[in-house]
Amino acid sequence: MLYFIGLGLADEKDISVNGLEIVRKAERVYLEAYTSILLVEKDKLEAFYERDVILADREMVESASDDILNDADKVNVAFLVVGDPFGATTHTDLLLRARQLNIPTRSLPNASIMNAIGACGLSLYTYGQTVSMPFFTDNWRPSSFYEKLAENATLGLHTLVLLDIKVKEPNLEAMARGRKVWEPPRYMTVRQCAEQMIEVEGERKQTWCGEEALAVGAARVGSSEQSFCSGTLSELSETDMGRPLHCLVLIGQRCHELEKDVIREWAVNKDNFDKAWEKGAYGK
């Protein structure tokens, strides 16, 4: 059987008891290592799980999945995913491939950023579509996220923005010379996300994510080092929230007073927060 096992968001102990028992008995254990990361290294997982763990990068999962599925109809194989197993379509694709090969599957869910973000104080019932923010480059500055963000904002809903991570990305110059060289890992910060949102608003000019829009920055959600920070995008574009992983929530205008009371506590500057709240007609 192929088991899809969610690991939660923080460390080796976030796995469920069921998941841990399966991992310790599985023939092979893979850790998907590119859609997200835990806040601990692989050796800590192996020590706690009492098992060797095989890192499964994007190339393995998307192009060499046969290695993962090999004999999974005869032995138990565990595929570990940070957060919840089906937060990324990549894992759905692996599930479909297993079904095509008549390999039985089972999913063990866990906390993901999609529900853990509720700890920032904004009700999960008032979120719209989630969007992703990629790293901008000199010649690639996509703004396709803006349409969904604008739809949410029109309805007064909050928008969870998931921030880009780059793990085991090839160096394009080396690739052009026929060599495989990997770039060092990069993780987008709340500061970078806010800067890029302001830049896109400058092009779109619809006021949804300009400098005065209110947002909540989140870092290391679900861990003992969890941190939140609220304020205008201009303020967040100058805020250092420390080590990854980060995400950001753009606040919708239907924000309830109870939500406001919580997120105001995270404010960079409470007076500025109150002014932006009134100016943006939040809670109306």
Image (cartoon, helix red, strand yellow):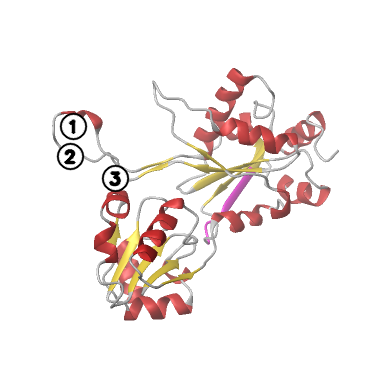
When asked about the image quadrant of residue 165, the answer is top left
When asked about the image quadrant of residue 106, the answer is bottom left
- Is there any visible trace of residue 227 in the rendered image? yes
Residue 226 is covered by the magenta coloring: yes
Q: Which mark is residue 180?
A: 2
- Is there any visible trace of residue 268 in the rendered image? no
Residue placed at 69% from the left, 38% from the top? 152
Residue 201: percent from left, percent from top: 61, 23
Where does the magenta region start and end? 224-229
Q: Which mark is residue 168?
A: 3
> Dot 2 lies on which element?
loop
Q: On screen, 119 above or below 203?
A: below
Residue 168: percent from left, percent from top: 29, 45
Instruction: Measure the alpha-carbon separation of dots 2 and 1.
Output: 6 Å
> Dot 3 lies on which element?
loop
Name the residue that disc number 1 marks: 174
Please state which amino acid type lies under the numbered disc 1.
Answer: Ala
Instruction: Measure the alpha-carbon separation of dots 1 and 3.
Output: 14 Å
Instruction: Measure the alpha-carbon separation of dots 2 and 3.
Output: 11 Å
Residue placed at 73% from the left, 40% from the top? 252
Crowd band around label 1 with a 10 angstrom C-alpha radius: few (<14), some (14–19), many (20+):
few
Q: On screen, 187 above or below 101?
A: above
Q: Earlier in the sequence, mark 2 or mark 3?
A: 3
